[in-house]
Amino acid sequence: MDRESEMRDNLFRVVTVLYIIIYARLSKEEEGKTPEEQSKSIQNQIDICQRYINDEQQKYPNIQFKVVAKLSDDGISGTTFDRADFKRLIKLIESKQANMVITKDQSRFGREHIESDNYMERWFPEHNVRYVAVLDGVDTYVPDSANNDMAPIKNWMNEMYAKHTSRSVKATKKKNALEGIWNGGEPVLGLQIDPNNEGCLILEPKGAEIVKMLAELVLDNKSLDEIVDILIEKKIPIPSIIKGNSRNLNKEVEEIWDTETIRDILTNEMITGVMVQGKTTTLSHKSKKVIYLPEEDWIRVPDKVPVIIPRERFEAIQTMLKSNKNKTTKSHDYLLKGLMRCADCGHAISIKHFKDRKNNYVECCYYKKYGRRKEVCTAHRFSYEELEKLVLDNVKNECMQYVKDNDLAEKLKNKKESKEKQVDLRLKIDKCNRNIDKLNKSIDKMYQRLDAGIIDEDDYTRMTKNTKAAINSEKLLLETYTKDLEVLKEKKVKEPNYIKIVKEFLSLKKPNRILLSRLIEVIYVNDDGTIDIHYRVKNPYKDN
C-alpha cells in the first residue's frame, strides 16, 4: 500500500474503515437570522461535513468512509453538553459503533472550553476516535498539527463569544424591560401576547373577566376555599385550559382550581397595568440555575399593559388576602406533625386545630383539597389526641420489648457472633452509602427537571425537602452503624446509640418530636383508624 494513501489511528495502526458521525448544532440565538447568518444552519453544516468526507475518500481510496449517523441538536446552547443527540454520539462511540466525529467547526461541537478541550485532547484519543473540525483544520489523527495545537485557544475564544452573547442578551432584555417591552414568557391570566407585536401585551377578554370576578369575590369577603367552590360550581376553566397550554393534568382534578393559583393571579401587579419583569436571573452563561431577585429589584414600567383591576381595588384586595390568610388556623408544634401519611393515597395527614375546642382532628390532605369536589380518597378524620395516645402506647410497647430482647452484653461475649455482626454492619454501612448516593443523584435530577421547566420551584422545593429528609435519615443510620462497628472492633461491651434512644424514650414522661422522629420513619393512618408504624430502628432479635 502506498504510504501516502495510508492513515494511522491513535494506536499507530493502519486505518481501513472509518465509521463516521456527522454532528451539527444550532443555538437558540442563531435561529431566524438573516440569509447570511443562515450559513450556520443544520443542513449547511451537514453539507460541509459531507463534502469533506467526499474529499477524504478521494485522498484515501483504500479506506472505507461509512456515515453511521447524522446527529444534530437544534436550539441548544454550546455552553452545555447536556444535549440529546450529543449524548447519542457518546453512546455510539462507547458501543464501538463509531470511530470518527466530524463537525463544521469547533464552535458547533461546543462553546465551553474546559469540556471541549477534554473531549478533543483526552476523551477522543483514549477511545481511538478521530475528531475533525473542518473549517478550523483540526484533525486528531494528524500528529504535530499546528491547528490541533491552536484548538484549545479556539475553544477558549468560542466560550468568550458565548459569554459575550449571554451578556448581550441580558443587556437587551434589561433594556427592553426598562422600556416596557415584553421579553417573552407566559403573562398573567387576562393578558396575552399581541400576535402582531411580540413585545406588547393586549387584553385577553375571557381571562380578564375571570380576574375581575375573582377580585369581586375577594372584596366580598369570600375565602379562597369558598372562591374555589364557586368557580367549580360555575364550571369556570382553570388558567391552563383558558390559555390552551398542553400539559399532563391529573384527570381526577384537572378542572379544579387551586387556592394558590387564585392568590398568584390577584397578587400579580401586572393586572393593574404595570409591566413587571426582571424577577429572576441566572448565575452565569454556563449555569442555568434560576436566581429569584428581591422584589425591590424588579423592573416596573407603568401604563404598558391594559388595566384589568384599578390600583385602588388592587391594594384593597391585598389587604383582604392578608387579613384572611390562615384566619381559622394556627400553627402548633404537635408531637406527630410531619410523621403521618394516609395509608390509602400516600399523601400527608394534616392536623386541624380549633382554638376553642379541647380536641383537634387529623385529615388526609388529598381529601381535604379535592375530596369535597371529587371522589378522591376518604377523610381519614380522627381525633388527634386519641391518635397520639395510640402511637405513644405502640412505641412504648415496642421499646420495652426491644430492651427486653436486647441482652447486648451477653451476646457480644460470643466471638463468632461478634464477627457475624461486624459483617452485617459493614453491609448496612455500604447500603446506607449507596442509598445516600442514590438520593443525592435524585436531587440532581430534580434540579435538571427544574432547569428544563418540567417542574416549578414549589414542586422542586417540596420534592427535595422529602429527599433531603430521607438523606438525613440514612446519615443517622450510617453514623449509628459506624459507631457500633467501632465498638465491636474494639471488643468492648457497649450499648449502641439506638439502644440509648430507646431508653431515653422510655425515661421521658412525654417525648419530644425530635426524639420521636429518630425512632419513627412514618406513621400510616388507615381508613378504620388503625395505624401502621414504620420504625427507623428495627429490633434485631424480633422475627419480622
Image (cartoon, rainbow, N blue to C red):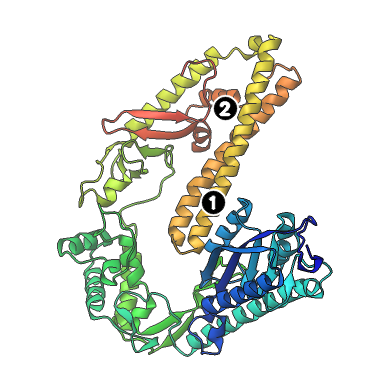
Across and down, in percent, residue 521 comes to 47, 34
Q: For this view, does 182 lie left or right of residue 312?
A: right
Judge whether 536 appears above or below 132 on screen.
above
Q: Do we see residue 231 in this rendering?
A: yes
In the image, what residue type sits under mark 2? Answer: Ile
Name the residue rendered at 68%, 79% in the picture. 135
**Quarter-wise, where is residue 263 in the image?**
bottom left
> Few, some or many C-alpha atoms within 10 Å of disc 2 (few <14, some 14-19, many ≥20)?
some
Badge 1 marks a residue whose secondary structure is helix
> Few, some or many C-alpha atoms within 10 Å of disc 1 (few <14, some 14-19, many ≥20)?
some
Asked whether 240 or 18 is in front, the reply is 18
Asked whether 39 or 288 is in front, the reply is 39
Q: Nearer the viewer, mark 2 or mark 1?
A: 1
Across and down, in percent, residue 256 comes to 25, 59
Q: Which mark, by number, is residue 473? A: none
Name the residue carrying label 2.
501
> Cα distance, mark 2 to mark 1?
30 Å
Q: For this view, does 348 lie left or right of residue 210?
A: right
Name the residue rendered at 63%, 71% in the picture. 53
Across and down, in percent, residue 429 comes to 64, 31
Name the residue carrying label 1.
443
In the image, what residue type sits under mark 1? Answer: Ile
Indicate the quadrant containing the N terminus: top left, top right, bottom left or bottom right: bottom right
Across and down, in percent, residue 142 comes to 78, 68
Total numbered badges shown on the rendered structure: 2
Farthest residue to the front: give it.
1
Judge whether 227 appears above or below 337 on screen.
below
